[in-house]
């Protein structure tokens, strides 16, 4: 069973930045895709972006502000979030796809507030 550890959430002011980390217990080179989601109260889980090898795609709602990346040496994938807005507040999850299985991180809280 692959474990996925998330970190990097916190509280920031509007306009601030955070970088979320997602580290699976599996070899990073076995990852076929990484996707990021967020859950806000009263709303369905929202897809934010995905990285399947050399192609990275972000949702229109965060395009230009959120960026996906990975550090193979550290075995970690990242979600860089810039120019954060109060509407970005929520619990953020990464999902790692290996073979036919998906593995979720435990979620990390992001709060954007003045």
Image (cartoon, rainbow, N blue to C red):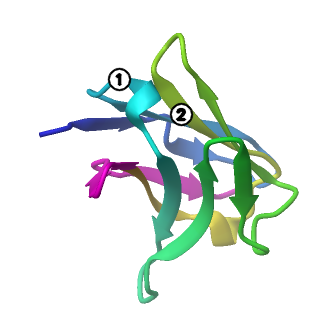
Task: Provide residue 39's location: percent of width, then percent of height.
Answer: 44, 71
Q: Nearer the viewer, mark 1 or mark 2?
A: 1
Q: Nearer the viewer, residue 80 or 113?
A: 80
Q: Is 62 placed above or below 15 here?
A: below
Residue farthest left in this picture = 1
The residue shown at (26%, 27%) is 25
Q: Residues within 10 Å of mark 1 (few under 14, many from 20)?
A: few
- What secondary structure prevails in the magenta region? strand
Image coordinates for residue 93, horizontal then vertical, percent = 42, 55
- Which residues, given as a range, are shown in magenta? 97-114
Q: Residue tagged by mark 1?
A: 27
The answer to which image quadrant residue 41 occupies is: bottom left
**Picture quadrant of residue 30:** top left
Secondary structure category for the residue under label 1 = loop
Secondary element at image label 2: strand
In this image, 104 relative to 86: left or right? Answer: left
Q: Residue at x 51, y 56 (%)?
A: 35
Closer to the camera, 17 or 106? 106
The residue depicted at 72 percent of the width and 62 percent of the height is 58
Going from N to C along the chain, the mark reached first, 1 or 2, is 1
Mark 2 surroundings within 10 Å by alpha-carbon count, few (fewer than 14), some (14 through 19), many (20 or more): many
Q: Residue visible at 35% across and 23% down? A: 27
The answer to the question of whether label 1 and label 2 lie on touching residues, with beta carbons closer than 8 A, is no
Q: Residue 106 lies in magenta, yes or no? A: yes
Asked whether residue 111 is drawn in magenta, I would say: yes
Q: Which residue is mark 2?
A: 77
Q: Does residue 107 appear to the left or right of 87 in the view shown? A: left
- Assign the N terminus to one quadrant of the image: top left
Residue sitting nearer the eye, 22 or 34: 34
Q: Position of residue 64 (x, y in %)?
A: 88, 57
- Residue 26 left/right relative to 53: left
């Amino acid at each position: 069973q692959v474990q996925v550890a998330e970190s990097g959430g916190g509280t920031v002011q509007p306009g601030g930045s955070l970088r979320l980390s997602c580290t699976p217990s599996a070899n990073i080179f076995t990852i076929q895709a990484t996707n990021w989601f967020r859950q806000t109260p009263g709303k369905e889980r929202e897809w934010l972006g995905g990285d399947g090898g050399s192609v990275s795609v972000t949702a229109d709602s965060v395009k230009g502000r959120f960026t996906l990346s990975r550090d193979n040496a550290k075995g970690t994938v990242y979600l860089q979030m810039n120019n954060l807005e109060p509407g970005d507040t929520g619990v953020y999850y990464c999902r790692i796809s290996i073979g036919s299985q998906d593995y979720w991180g435990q979620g990390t809280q992001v709060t954007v507030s003045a």
